[in-house]
């Protein structure tokens, strides 16, 4: 007998970085019917596909959840913007495109924490499988995968000066941050192809949408997971003004990201019991770890006025340069429109005591007062530092039983002493690079924090006043074997049947780099686990 039309083998909630990968891999054999629910719409917005356009998407409610944090105590009680993609491709459709995997040691650390199957050696095949690396194949890189990775098209004099200055300050040059070692200064690679963004909606979902066993519903907000006892059996969602129900004969897989996956679990009765009862939600499982352990990278941006009109500010504010840049992009897919959030950058150790880089620099050839704001009218650029392995831990908690209301997001940036010390050391390290002759040639003025800011106290005050997210929230449904962990090493919600979380929220600790590549890897591996467990149910049940 055929299954009813609203019954699927798998229901995936969220068509973001992870969800699009899952939709592709789970439908590939043709044997499984998959429902993919996405709260946002189609990725037709022009600026999604032009890399530079990411700056226009920070505040665009058509593609972005536009979250904000609660007032942050260590950042002068400022609320910090928390953009998240609400569109096919999720945050991979609005992010800065930088392709960075983190450090090998990040994954070996996950393994050390007890997560079998997550050492670097274990996850490398999934990075390689996902990748179509423009530079070709080698032991660490793959070709032929769905995620196109390309070089920044042309060297830029400011980036060259930054890289040379880093070398003169004693750091190595690094031409592949995803290679054998991460340390050093160099150019970033982008998830892009021929100057176009390569989100997971483009790389993975486009192909999957041609398959008849995938049902994609956009503008569909999952409002509740349905349970029979402690087993997930379906999802309730809102679509076109109606509340609908879909059943899963196999599994429900949450891929809503680090804010929305814990929110949906909590709305569905899985989370801290006290919190759920406060909002009249029946508790299915009292799990204090759901929404706990939020981690994020805080970035502190130093701003410079440039001695020469060679920055993106100068292009944007001159119609002649704009036309030239537009034509170059239209004809050759090159030039400033083809670059992402950072052009060059680096990974550095703030002291000889740390074994691997503990700060990252994003070197950006334009300047603005805040992310997404208009560019300055004078030549300017930015170099930011962020601490790679913060100790501060925050949370995501529902503020209402209404699924349309945003949750409370509280990263608690700089709440750990180590984080404050590292940020301080990072700012000093960045200045050490910027005073080298190649960079000095281009610096008319350090605008922020400014030369008068020299003491530790003043530098830290600057970090508190200017620090903001670099958009890498993770770990709110952390994988692990301890009592607070939410998913096990096969990404199954502990103690609940037929329910997994597969997205940024499962990272035991945030990786030492930008997070999209790691999420794609997690989803590649998660898809394999789901398919393996489906074909070996007896083994699965016995575990
Ligand atoms: C502005 C910005 C810049 C960034 N820059 C970079 C960068 O340069 N390089 C990098 O590596 N990383 C970057 N990141 C981070 C990276 O993009 C994210 O870590 C990654 O995309 C997260 O993937 P995810 O699958 O966990 O969540 P997402 O990609 O955010 O996907 C979640 C999806 O689920 C949907 N959803 C959520 N709740 C529901 C619900 N209840 N019902 C239905 N659908 C739902 C959302 O609409 C979304 O489409 C950036 C992120 C942002 C926001």
Image: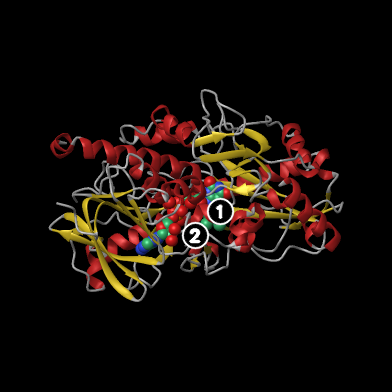
**Label 1 CB sits under 8 Å from any ligand 1 atom:** yes
Residue furthest to the bottom in view is 241
Residue 130 seen in the figure: yes
The label on residue 95 is 1
Q: Is residue 297 above or below residue 177?
A: below
Circle 2 is placed at which residue position? 85
- Residue at 78% from the left image edge and 50% from the top image edge: 328
Q: Position of residue 424 (x, y in %)?
A: 61, 49
| Percent of width and height locating residue 500 | 28, 49
Q: Where does the image place residue 405, in percent across and percent down from the top left?
A: 38, 73
Crowding around mark 1 (Cα neighbors within 10 Å: few <14, some 14 to 19, many 20+) is many
Instruction: Say which residue appears at 81% left-offset and 42% top-offset.
Output: 157
Residue 421 percent location from the top left of the image: 55, 47
* Helix, strand or loop status at disc 1: loop
The relative height of residue 264 versus residue 175 in the rendered view (above or below) is below
Q: Look at the numbered disc 2 and say if its residue's Cβ is closer than 8 Å to ligand 1.
A: yes
Frontmost residue, 5 versus 26: 5
Mark closest to the chain's N terminus, 1 or 2: 2
Relative placement, left or right, of 539 versus 246 is: left
């Amino acid at each position: 007998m055929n299954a009813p039309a609203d019954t699927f083998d798998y229901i995936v909630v969220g068509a973001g970085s992870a969800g699009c990968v899952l939709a592709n891999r789970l439908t590939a054999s043709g044997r499984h019917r998959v429902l993919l629910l996405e709260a946002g719409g189609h990725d037709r917005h022009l600026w999604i596909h032009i890399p530079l356009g990411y700056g226009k998407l920070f505040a665009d409610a058509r593609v972005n959840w536009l979250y904000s944090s609660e007032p942050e105590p260590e950042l002068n009680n400022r609320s910090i913007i928390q953009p998240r993609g609400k569109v096919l491709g999720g945050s991979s459709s609005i992010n800065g495109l930088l392709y960075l995997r983190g450090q090998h040691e990040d994954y070996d650390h996950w393994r050390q924490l007890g997560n079998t199957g997550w050492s670097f050696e274990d996850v490398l095949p999934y990075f390689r499988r996902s990748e179509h690396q423009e530079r070709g194949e080698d032991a660490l890189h793959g070709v032929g995968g769905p995620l196109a990775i390309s070089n920044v098209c042309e060297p830029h004099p400011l980036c060259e000066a930054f890289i040379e200055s880093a070398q003169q300050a004693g750091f190595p040059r690094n031409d592949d941050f995803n290679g054998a070692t991460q340390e050093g200064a160099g150019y970033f690679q982008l998830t892009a192809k021929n100057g176009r963004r390569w989100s997971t909606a483009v790389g993975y979902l486009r192909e999957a949408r041609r398959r008849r066993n995938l049902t994609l519903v956009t503008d569909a907000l999952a409002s509740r997971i349905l349970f029979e006892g402690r087993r997930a059996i379906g999802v309730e969602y809102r679509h076109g003004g109606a509340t609908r129900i879909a059943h899963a004969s196999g599994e429900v897989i949450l891929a809503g990201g680090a804010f929305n996956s814990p929110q949906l679990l909590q709305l569905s009765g899985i989370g801290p019991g006290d919190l759920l009862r406060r909002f009249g939600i029946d508790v299915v499982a009292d799990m204090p770890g759901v929404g706990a352990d939020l981690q994020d990278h805080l970035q502190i941006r130093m701003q410079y006025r440039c001695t020469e009109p060679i920055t993106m500010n100068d292009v944007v504010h001159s119609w002649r340069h704009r036309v030239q840049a537009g034509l170059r992009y239209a004809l050759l897919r090159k030039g400033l429109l083809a670059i992402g959030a950072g052009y060059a950058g680096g990974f550095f150790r703030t002291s000889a005591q740390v074994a691997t880089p503990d700060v990252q620099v994003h070197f950006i050839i334009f300047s603005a007062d805040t992310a997404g704001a208009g560019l300055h009218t004078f030549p300017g650029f930015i170099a930011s530092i962020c601490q790679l392995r913060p100790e501060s831990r925050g949370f995501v908690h529902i503020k209402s039983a209404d699924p349309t209301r945003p949750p409370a997001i509280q990263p608690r940036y700089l709440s750990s002493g180590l984080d404050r010390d590292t940020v301080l050391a990072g700012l000093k390290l960045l200045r050490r690079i910027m005073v080298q002759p190649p960079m000095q040639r281009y610096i008319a003025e350090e605008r922020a924090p400014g030369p008068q800011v020299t003491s530790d106290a003043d530098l830290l005050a600057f970090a508190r006043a200017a620090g903001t997210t670099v958009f890498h929230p993770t770990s709110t449904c952390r994988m692990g074997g301890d009592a607070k962990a939410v998913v096990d090493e096969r990404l199954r919600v502990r103690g609940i049947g037929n329910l997994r979380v597969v997205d940024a929220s499962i990272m035991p600790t945030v990786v030492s780099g930008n997070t999209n590549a790691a999420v794609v890897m997690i989803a590649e591996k998660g898809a394999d686990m789901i398919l393996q467990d489906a074909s070996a149910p007896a083994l699965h049940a016995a575990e």
